[in-house]
Amino acid sequence: MVRREFLKVASTAVGAVALAPWVLEREAAAAAEVDAVKSAFAEAALTRAKVLGASYADIRINRYRSEAIVTRERQVQNVARNQDFGFGVRVLVNGTWGFAASSIVTADEVRRVTAVAVDIARANSMFQRKRVRLAPVEAAVANWKSAFDKDPFDVPLDDKIHFLLALNDTALKTSGVSFVNSSLRWVNEQRFLATSDGSRIEQYLIRGDPQFTVTAVSRETGDFQTRRSLSGPQARGYEYIEKFPWQAEATKAAEEAVEKLKAKSVEPGRYDLVIHPSNLWLTIHESAGHSTELDRALGWEADYAGTSFLTPDKAGKLRFGSSLVNIVADRVQPTGLATVAYDDDGVPAQRWYLVKDGIFVDWQTSRELASLIDRKKSYGCTNADSWRSVPFARMPNVSLEPGAQDTSLDDLVGGVEKGILIYGDGSWSIDQQRYNFQFGGQTFWEISNGKVAGMMRDVAYQSRSTDFWGACDGLGGRSTYELSGSFVDGKGEPGQVGVVSHGCPVARFRQINVLNTSVSMT
Amino acid sequence: MLLTEADARTITNKLLGYATADDVVVFIESEDYSHLRFAANTFLTSGRREGTTARVTAWIGKRRGAAATTDLSDAALKQAVADAQTFAKLAPVDVEYLPSLAQQSYKPGRGWVDATAQIDLPARARQISEAISRSEKANVIGAGFHQVGLLAHASATAHGNFHYERGSLVSLGMTARTPDAMGSGYFARNHYDVGQLDTGRVARESIRRASESRGGRMLPAGSYPVILEAQAVADLLDSGGMSFDARNADEGRSVFSLPGGATRVGTKLFDPRINILSDPWRPQLATFTASDDGVPAQAMHLVRNGVVESLRYSRYWAQQKNTQPSGPFALVLEPSTPGISVEEMIKTTKRALLVSRFFYIRTVDRRSASVTGLTRDGVWYIENGEIKYPVRNFRFNQSIVLMLGPGNVDAIGVPERVASSEGGTDPLLVPALRLNAFNFTSQSDAI
């Protein structure tokens, strides 16, 4: 039903013109040309690095294809496709890292850039205090594709444009809607990693990020309210567009944006919160995802992203949350944005507990980090966002496990006298050690005596990570579990953008501090 | 190797020559970038990346398509043009299409210094090693980031415009922490001229702040008078919490919108001593002077003596409103009266908190340009002209517009070049500010 309506609206927007197949054929031809020689380039780099004195080396020859379509109301603002191709060589010389990268992928350039990486490592090694060690890893030879049914780069562009304009059209039908912005972004990573340990790994990943924002403006009062789409980016193919009820979501978003203009402004105070996965994923990301990064705990991110309240002595001891709280790191979860077969150290993807029965139990590690806490192996968290970026520790998918019972959202709401039900991620902020956070949302619903009452607005909840997770007294069952995530998780110097998913059920938290975020300009 | 003007012109001419579209804009960005990162008093990563990206935007019958490539071979450039044209054929009519620019006149930028491009590896390693040595001697743990970025930009259009510009940048930021994790200090500066970057000062200041912030007292949340150092002011103003975008204001979705469809242009919204400008030719800033599509920068007042004088216009919105497009933004906040130093501010303060840096700033209410975030790496309590003791960190929720409003700004410092500590390298020229009230909403345990 939804699909049929979509086609009807779409066909009136633009003519049905397919992307010329020869464009994709040429891309494939260019890729094949490089495929034929990249093993040779890899051998050249690794041999050159060894001759120049590197004790370890790796080379990543990566191609990134991205496509972005941006619209507002009934117009397309941009249609763009980018090809980003190059290589990066990482070496260890005298226990000191060196890295160099170039967009010119030729044998001569590979040899030159390898020498630059060695020169950098050698110059710095003269002043190095602590020599880098790497936890061992077995060599792997693999070829892997992420889980997707329909490669979005094979889907005609006009289908995608139709999809967005139909979304906008749907939202604009609701009286009171002033603006709609929507976008559709696809990324294809074609990664090749060769290491001096003997690994040769090829990976092909697809990720998509559809999103839209509806704005309702009241010219009379000067007020405006927005409602963003609740469903987040995923490592899925075009089936994500075809199977999710986007049009119904657009209608709902439009109605809720308009309703927000007249919603009751929240009275600040303590409330029981029932939080939907579309909001809770971001709280997991900030309070549990980043705090369990070992590089932060060791002070490596002190200058920018920050450190962590989970210092190295606290693993296995600190109570992170109530006994209901089980948080897993997972790089094998299907459709997870951080899901891979191997990380950029050549370590296989894994699943492990970070928080078990409410106790903080383990870290996210790379080969280098694992060696610093005397681990025999890495959990495989090394990643670089580009061929031009230095691989370093990035977050795996980090998710809250659902409760054992099949508890529903209504069940959790039923146990609340005075509370707020929250959907969608809004404003977010947390301190540099991951204690104090404040999160907004997209829609807020008053809960009174176990029932959802009317809409509220201007809500933000503020808490301390361990207080918040300690106040968790109810988890939804597997049927309430959803996966959301981020396409733009920033970390590191130079800054890199990570992609990561967080799954969770609906969950309840008792007596959390709620602020009113509205400010009068008069 | 950074592209020269001649190299860039060759590539833009090729791209334009390959195109058969009705209109084309091409943009080339060439980069030669290197970094050295350190933490826990040892080097972490260090690297260099070189690359060029060519971007093509084509219009066929006012339909727009774009493509980009990092491969500069003739075949790849032809493919990028063909892709952009293919996408243009598929796209609906771009109702905001404006013909690309004819030849513009550009006032030259001044943000390139050869010496910055010639920093050598051993010298940099030694310089950072010295910063670590200072940390070791002071018994603090140093973490920081040194980077050298060389950029060349070129844009060209089917209607005859061509612009080339290059810029250099060197920066060092450092965070020092006491071994007991009870004190933390930060300091960072960047410049296009390596001769103007005092790396020793960066190390000294971060170490001093770490030592002097150790053992902070927890004070109750609430509204406090504050002195915001220039770094903290830059963090707030670069956060995106207060956008001067004209279209958003006209569409009723900005702090500069008024009920009934009007805007706040002409309104006295800020303290009468406050001027907010865009001026990439200020010698302290010297940032790029053209946008990616070739629009020349304008030196313009946004706020003059507290009154909103203008907002910032894209090409399309400028045409709709019969005004000039604004080009790239280089933010300057300067007082109408002579500024005073932070030291003078402290001496003449009865009671206030001194804030050195903000962190994780996010917008919570665009209607009032309200943001939330936290203090970080040094807060001190001032009483009767003296710093009395360090204070633990706070979360704040604060409207930037009301913060700079009449009656809240008590004293304004001397503008200095600072980049946001939230990951930005674009410099701002901003002063320290003494404010009568700043809204701290909760305590943070973070140090």
Image (cartoon, grey):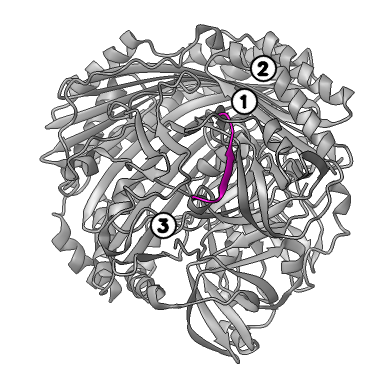
Q: CA distance from mark 1 to mark 2?
A: 8 Å
**In front of the other: A99 or B217:** B217
Point out the image quarter for the N terminus of chain A.
bottom left
What secondary structure is marked by label 1? Answer: strand
Q: Are marks 1 and 2 in contact (CB under 8 Å)?
A: yes
At 74% from the left and 51% from the top, the residue drawn is: A292
- First of labels 1, 2 by sequence position: 1
The correct choice, above or below, for A521 with respect to A108 in the image is: below
Name the chain letter of the residue that bears numbered label 1: B
Amino acid type, residue under disc 3 in the picture: Asp
Q: Residues within 10 Å of mark 3 (few under 14, many from 20)?
A: few
Q: CA distance from mark 2 to mark 3?
A: 55 Å
Picture quadrant of residue B384? top right
At 79% from the left and 52% from the top, the residue drawn is: A309
At 66% from the left and 38% from the top, the residue drawn is: A304
Bounds of the magenta segment: B406-414
Q: Which residue is mark 3?
A: A149
Amino acid type, residue under disc 2 in the picture: Asp
- Is B148 covered by the magenta stretch? no
Residue B289 horizontal side relative to residue B33, left or right = left
Q: Which residue is mark 2?
A: B198
Residue B387 horizontal side relative to residue A498, left or right = right
Which of label 3 and label 1 is nearer to you?
A: 1
Q: Position of residue A274 (x, y in %)?
A: 60, 77
Amino acid type, residue under disc 1 in the picture: Arg
Q: Which residue is mark 1?
A: B189
Note whether residue A35 is visible.
Answer: no
**In front of the other: A151 or A114:** A114
Note whether residue B306 is visible.
Answer: yes
